[in-house]
Image (cartoon, rainbow, N blue to C red):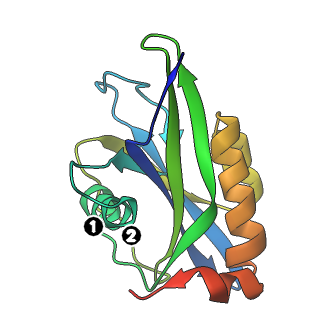
């Protein structure tokens, strides 16, 4: 029977440019062991004893140097199966709004970044879970629906 684990988090970072949300995508470094050169959201590992939300905030700071103006728990968990260790991985998903005009300072884990409108981000992201998470953030959080107010956390 496959093991189910939750060791990683994902953070969909966005800002507004002229009223339109732009989403931050990070390109993994070429020398990364797993998925080099892959475009992704802020993604990282949950440390022992750390809550997923704490890991999400820490990874945002470590990977981009950005501080959120608003932060949300997204009602979505990205999942994937790894056949190498017969494990189903569950990744809690978060969203962070940052001020417009501020650019990230990348850690050694990434070689490039880009701000994209939703349609371009969907074309760049390759995993279905990433696209689904983006769709939820775009529709319910960046779109300003009631869910945005209900899911928001203090910064």
> Residue 138 lies in what quarter of the image?
bottom right
Left or right of 21, for residue 82: left
Q: Which residue is mark 2?
A: 103
- The tag on residue 115 is none
Q: Position of residue 10 (x, y in %)?
A: 48, 52
Using the numbered discs, state the Cα–Cα distance from disc 2 to disc 1 in whole angstroms: 9 Å
Mark nearer the N terminus (2 vs 1): 1
Quadrant containing the N terminus is: top right
Q: Position of residue 56 (x, y in %)?
A: 38, 61
Q: Is residue 73 left or right of residue 32?
A: right
Q: Which residue has dot 1 on it?
A: 65
Residue displayed at 78% across by 70% down: 139
Tell me where residue 125 appears, x and y as whole percent: 63, 40
Q: Quadrant of the C terminus?
A: bottom left
Residue 37's quadrant in the figure?
Answer: top left
Mark 2, secondary structure of its residue: loop
Taking the spot 67% from the left edge, 57% from the top edge, the residue there is: 134
Q: Nearer the viewer, mark 2 or mark 1?
A: 1
- Farthest residue in the front direction? 1
Check disc 2: other Cα within 10 Å, few if <14, some if 14-19, many if 20+: some
């Amino acid at each position: 029977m496959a093991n189910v684990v939750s060791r990683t988090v994902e953070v969909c970072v966005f800002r507004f440019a002229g009223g339109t949300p732009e989403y931050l995508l990070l390109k993994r470094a070429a020398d990364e062991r797993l998925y080099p050169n892959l475009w992704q959201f802020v993604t990282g590992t949950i440390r022992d004893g750390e809550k997923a939300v704490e890991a999400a905030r820490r990874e945002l700071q470590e990977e981009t140097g950005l501080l959120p103006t608003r932060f949300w728990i997204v009602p979505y968990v990205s999942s994937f199966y790894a056949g190498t260790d017969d494990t189903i991985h569950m990744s809690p998903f978060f969203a962070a709004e940052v001020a417009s005009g501020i650019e990230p300072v990348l850690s050694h884990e990434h070689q490039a970044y880009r701000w994209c409108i939703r349609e371009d981000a969907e074309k760049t992201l390759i995993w279905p879970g990433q696209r689904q998470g983006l769709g939820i953030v775009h529709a319910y959080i960046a779109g300003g629906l009631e869910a945005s107010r209900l899911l928001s956390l203090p910064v």
